[in-house]
Structure formats: structure tokens, C-alpha cells
Image (cartoon, rainbow, N blue to C red):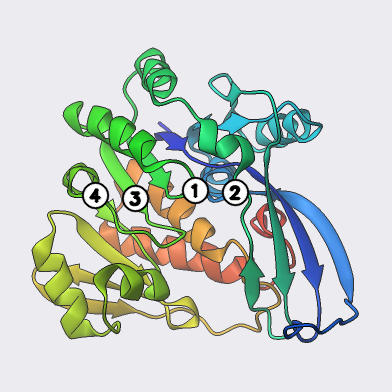
């Protein structure tokens, strides 16, 4: 049976400008191309898991603008259940993105309706959905909402994945209810307060009850297994657009975890999907082979 996964998180409209070099202060540059697409860390992760075949439920909050119907239609096309999406008056979330000639990105997230997601409604939705295999959360919605839904999932024996992005220190309450903690290298450094290296990763892992995986971009990922740091590499490719690669990793890992694959196999699948995504333009549009 396909795993049953619930994503509680953000949904945005990505507004992507491609340039050779991003502008400095006061500088104007010409771009090469522009595209609008669907994004938001929660939505990206849901779509990746849905493409892989999981039974995915999305709990997010959309505004009353034109982006709402577009976003719901996109979820439905990508095997993501939209029955439990919340709506409010006002703007949906948007994310202006710059991608330079090397494929690196700079992103400004304007949360809009994402900031208004209701924790009580989210828990009511989880109760209605019934037992799930994996719950996934990120930091593009209020911390209190994550705390509430993770506590509910943890108390019901559900595995949880916390992707602390954009970087923000999780509360002790949230970490206590987190099965898998997955920052990238920069987020690890901001949360831990020191440079990423194997010693600091091992020390941090000893201070929390969660399993920890740190994504390292083109260098793969690092994780702690039986008190030892392990590094998994990934194939080298030419990056066109790195936007959403971390979300592809988390979405694929949630699918593999729900399928009860061995951890090494789960991480290798996540790396494969993340690496493939950077070879194409766009966010969710880059997830399909």
C-alpha cells in the first residue's frame, strides 16, 4: 500500500527571474527570462511525495485571490488531496526569486495567508483524515501551529519530519515531538550557532532526541547513525536552478520513510530526486523526470 502522508505547511506562488548576475545595491540588470510557478516549502514537499505515489494530504492556508484556485488545481494534478485546505480573506503567499547564471537562488518569502493557518482546524483535519504514516512541517507557517500538530502526531505514534526552513531555532517542545530533523548546512549553522562539521553535527545530535540529517547540496547529505557521522554523496550534475531541491529531498524522504525503506535507501532516493531537480528550471515543475 502507498504511504499516507500529511504535509502541514506553506503554499506560495513563485515569481522567478533568471539573470546572469544578481544586482548589487542600487544596480539594475537585465534578466534572461521569467516564469511564474507553484511553490512554498510545504506545497513542494507534498507535490514531490504525490508524484512518487504517496497518498498525500495538504493542510495549508490560501487567500481569496486568483492564486487560490490555481494552487488547488495544481495540487489535484499532482496527486495531493486538497479537502483540508483552509482559506481566508486577503493575499495568498508569494515568493519573488532570483536565480543567477550558476543556478544559485535568492528568495524573498511574503507569507500572506500562510501566517493565518489555524492550528485547531489543522488538528481537526488530522482527526478526520485518520491514521497517517508521516507528518511533515517547516518554518513558513507560525511555530505554534507546528508545535500543535507535531504534538498531536507524536502522541498518536506518527513519525514526524521537521524541515527548519527558513532557518529558525525550534522550541524544545517541537523537538521533543520530532522524529527526523532535516536542516540544510546553512540552517544547521544558524540553529547550532557554529560552523557545520562532523564534530558539531555529532554534538548537536547528542543534545536532541530526533534523528538528524543535514543536506549538503552538491555534496550529498550527512547523518548520524549509531553515534557516528556518515556522509552520502550524490552524482555530480550541472545545476540550472537549485530552487526547491531541499524540498524535493524532504518530500522524497517522507515517501520512503512511509514505505518503511531502510534509511540508507530512503536517503539515496531523496538525494536522487533532489539532484535531478537542479538540472531543470522551476520548482515543482522540475520534479518530474
Q: Quadrant of the C terminus?
A: bottom right
Q: Are marks 2 and 1 in contact (CB under 8 Å)?
A: yes
Depth-wise, is mark 2 or mark 4 nearer the camera? 4
Which residue carries the number 3 mark? Answer: 162
Q: What secondary structure is marked by label 1?
A: loop
Q: Quadrant of residue 193 in the image?
A: bottom left
Which residue does the numbered mark 2 point to in the structure image?
40
What residue lies at 15% left-to-right and 75% top-to-bottom? 202
Lower sequence index among marks 2 and 4:
2
Give the class, few, some or many, for how many residues have Cα within 10 Å of label 2's Cα (few <14, many ≥20): many
How far from the left and from the top, in percent, is residue 209?
Answer: 12, 54
Q: Secondary structure at mark 4?
A: loop
Question: What residue sits 61% from the left and 82% below the top?
Answer: 237
Judge from the rendering whether residue 289 lies leftward or rightward of residue 65; answer left or right: left
Marks 2 and 1, how far apart at CA: 8 Å
Closer to the camera in the image, 55 or 160: 160
Q: Earlier in the sequence, mark 3 or mark 2?
A: 2
Marks 4 and 3, how far apart at CA: 12 Å
Q: Are the residues tagged 4 and 1 within 8 Å (C-beta)?
A: no
Spatial CA span between label 4 and label 1 = 15 Å
Q: Which residue is mark 4?
A: 171
The answer to whether 76 appears left or right of 167 in the picture is right
**Rendered-image quadrant of the N terminus:** top left
Amino acid at each position: 500500500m502507498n504511504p499516507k502522508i500529511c504535509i502541514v505547511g506553506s503554499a506560495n506562488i513563485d515569481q522567478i527571474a533568471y539573470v546572469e548576475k544578481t544586482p548589487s545595491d542600487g544596480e539594475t540588470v537585465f534578466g534572461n527570462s521569467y516564469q511564474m510557478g507553484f511553490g512554498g516549502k510545504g506545497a513542494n514537499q507534498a507535490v514531490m511525495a504525490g508524484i512518487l505515489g504517496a497518498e498525500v494530504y495538504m493542510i495549508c492556508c490560501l487567500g481569496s485571490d486568483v492564486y487560490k484556485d490555481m494552487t488547488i488545481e495544481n495540487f489535484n494534478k499532482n496527486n495531493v488531496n486538497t479537502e483540508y485546505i483552509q482559506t481566508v480573506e486577503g493575499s495568498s503567499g508569494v515568493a519573488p526569486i532570483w536565480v543567477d547564471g550558476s543556478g544559485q537562488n535568492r528568495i524573498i518569502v511574503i507569507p500572506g495567508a500562510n501566517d493565518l493557518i489555524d492550528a485547531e482546524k489543522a488538528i481537526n483535519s488530522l482527526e478526520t483524515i485518520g491514521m497517517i504514516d508521516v507528518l511533515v512541517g517547516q518554518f513558513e507557517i507560525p511555530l505554534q501551529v507546528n508545535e500543535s500538530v507535531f504534538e498531536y502526531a507524536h502522541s498518536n505514534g506518527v513519525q514526524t519530519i521537521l524541515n527548519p526552513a527558513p532557518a529558525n531555532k525550534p522550541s524544545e517542545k517541537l523537538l521533543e515531538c520530532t522524529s527526523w530533523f532535516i536542516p540544510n548546512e546553512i540552517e544547521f549553522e544558524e540553529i547550532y550557532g557554529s560552523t557545520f562539521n562532523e564534530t558539531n553535527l555529532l554534538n548537536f545530535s547528542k543534545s536532541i532526541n530526533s534523528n538528524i540529517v543535514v543536506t549538503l547540496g552538491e555534496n550529498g547529505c550527512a547523518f548520524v547513525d549509531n553515534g557516528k557521522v556518515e556522509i552520502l554523496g550524490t552524482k555530480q550534475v550541472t545545476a540550472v536552478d537549485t530552487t526547491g531541491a531541499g524540498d524535493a529531498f524532504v518530500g522524497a524522504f517522507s515517501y520512503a520513510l512511509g514505505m518503511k525503506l531502510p534509511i540508507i535507501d530512503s536517503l539515496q532516493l531523496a538525494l536522487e530526486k533532489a539532484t535531478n531537480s537542479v538540472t531543470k528550471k522551476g520548482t515543482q515543475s522540475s520534479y518530474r523526470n
